Image: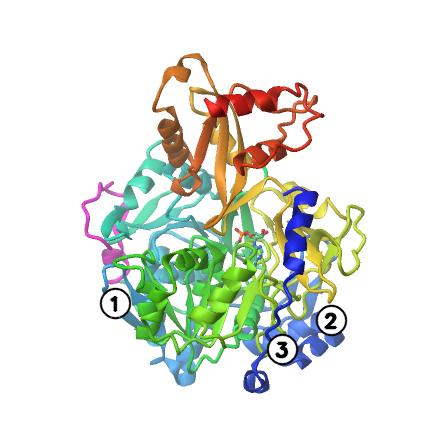
Amino acid sequence: MSAERQGDAFENLLHEERRFPPSEEFAANAVAQPSLYDEAREQGTEFWARQARELLTWEKDFTQTLDWSDAPFAKWFVGGTVNAAYNALDRHVEAGLGDRVAIHFEGEPGDTRTITYAELTREVKQAANAFESLGVRKGDRVAVYLPMIPEAVVTMLACARIGAVHSVVFGGFSADALRSRIDDAEAKLVVTSDGTYRRGKPSALKPAVDGALEKEGHTVTSVVVVRRNNEPVEWTEGRDVWWHDAVAHASEEHTAVAHDAEHPLFILYTSGTTGKPKGILHTTGGYLTQTAFTHKNTFDLRPETDVFWCTADIGWVTGHSYVAYAPLVNGATQLMYEGTPDTPHQGRWWELIEKYKVSILYTAPTAIRTFMKWGRDIPKKYDLSSIRVLGSVGEPINPEAWMWYREVIGGGKAPVVDTWWQTETGAHMIAPMPGVTAAKPGSAQVAVPGIAVDVVDEMGESVPNGSGGYLVIREPWPAMLRGIWGDPQRFKDTYWSRFDAMYFAGDGAKKDDDGDIWLLGRVDDVMNISGHRLSTTEIESALVSHPSVAEAAVVGASDETTGQAVVAFVILRGSAKDDDDIVTTLRNHVGKEIGPIAKPRNILVVPELPKTRSGKIMRRLLKDVAEGREVGDATTLSDPTIMQQIAASLRK
Ligand code: WT7
């Protein structure tokens, strides 16, 4: 978004005067009290040392809280050793909580599993043994290509247990996208399933793994396959093994060896401004500390009584931090649901909340807007009185969606917490505390205690209240990414070169008159579609890899439901111009190259693209076209008539 347009959007938000302070009762009993902010301010990094010791069980205590001498490469909790799986599982069983439900699983067809901490611990130990017997060792990489089924969490924790580094690839990514991620991380093992269920029908996953591994030259020696939908699959003898053979028969004894606090926990690929996804690297001690801390405080967690439900897929960072790790480290009970919100009917989520008495719901604005469209009569049919806290994540939440969420889902009383963070930050960074902050609809408002967030101008100077600029983080934080897999230079260039000694998040933001922060969207060529990050360049590369496309430019256009939608402008090569199906062909091509989530909503065939004299595509002008606005200043174009040519071609 241009600075000017962000300014306009902000002016509208400035009229937002509604305030929702916590009720007296909520405030008095809240997990996070105002003193938490004072402690964080007074104690500096030692605040995090205290949290690390309180929230985790360390095998060996650390001797130094933060080593920032090789900035921007941080080391947190130096000298400490810790095992993530032990913290998520064994210690709760040892504390006598083995019978507590860890996961209520509900499959899309309605099948269910109730998994206690004791059972989950047992299955993770078996999976750890199975993976080890397939040759996986500490430090090896394991690609995970699974739907939202308990085995996904089991796999991640089993990797963590043995010190193998998981790289979860979202099931909506294509075989090609999976292969490039397998290659970049040099994965030894892939864990997948025959498939899953989508909108009442079986949907396949294994063929994408077969496709990814078809061409020689990869590093994969085994593929473990979970049987989920019982559909027939191709089988490669010597490489493929069924989960029910390898895991179910493995020993239930497995001792978790503690790893260094900075031992890599996982890699998660995310889109940047170039065509090549970045492997964001997270390590163990700091990541677990901040995810557990935020899960407990932002959501006011009571592990004995709450039922937590984060609706994110494990293919995204939200599913890592707030499904696979924090809820289990905190000993909470959570719901995991495999399917779509409208199968078999549009009340499915509310039916699940009623059935499992979900008390904390964490979801994305795009889902909320979809439910708004379906109408409030649907959730009204269910008993949602168990809900006490509502969370939002993934993109700015517009005040109307925020209000609807609070009123219709939260019964007008559950606090809404809007949480800003990123794959790179690992855990919440900006979020109100539900018992402390007087909430403003549409704003994430305040930095999490212990986190140093600021908004700065072009020169890196902190802006005064009432002004906007770039969102930065001024001090290292425990769950920060430790780098980009295999590319330390790109890590420095992407995040640490725009401003001196500050992390640049890529988002625009403003401070209101109270100093509260309002997020305004990305300032780079990254789009946000339904809370998922996609790069314009990546989709452009996919389009031009098709023989019919001469040139392509992609923009994110605002969309009522998904926040943004992908709109592509393409120049075709000679003969393709007469092909009536070219738009469908190109949409499918993008689906094959990247995945269905990247398919453009619109593909517009144009005679030319607007470029500056130095050859840079002016996406700002294309965005005006895509959003149906009058086209802005086009005087710096190498050929100022191009926008008229484009307009004329689209009228045809
Ligand atoms: C980008 C990070 C964090 C997990 C999901 C997305 C946008 C995220 C918010 C929010 C405004 C938000 C930002 C950020 N974003 N949460 N509460 N308000 N914007 O993770 O794929 O790494 O994307 O999502 O633009 O940079 P991600």
Q: Position of residue 574 (x, y in %)?
A: 44, 12
**Which dot, 3 or 1, sits closer to the camera?**
3
Disc 2 within 8 angstroms of ligand 1 (CB): no
> Which comes before the other along the chain, label 2 or label 3?
2
Residue at point 35%, 66% (across, down): 377
Label 2, secondary structure: give it.
Answer: loop
Kindly tell me whether residue 287 is visible in this rendering.
yes
Q: Is residue 46 magenta?
A: no
| Residue position marked by numbered label 3 in the rendering | 436
**Coloring applied to the structure:** rainbow
Q: CA distance from mark 2 to mark 3?
A: 21 Å
| Residue position marked by numbered label 1 in the rendering | 112
Is 512 placed above or below 189 here? below
Q: Position of residue 115 (x, y in %)?
A: 31, 72
Q: Amino acid at mark 3?
A: Val
Give the position of the N terminus as an image quadrant. Answer: top right
Q: Amino acid at mark 1?
A: Thr
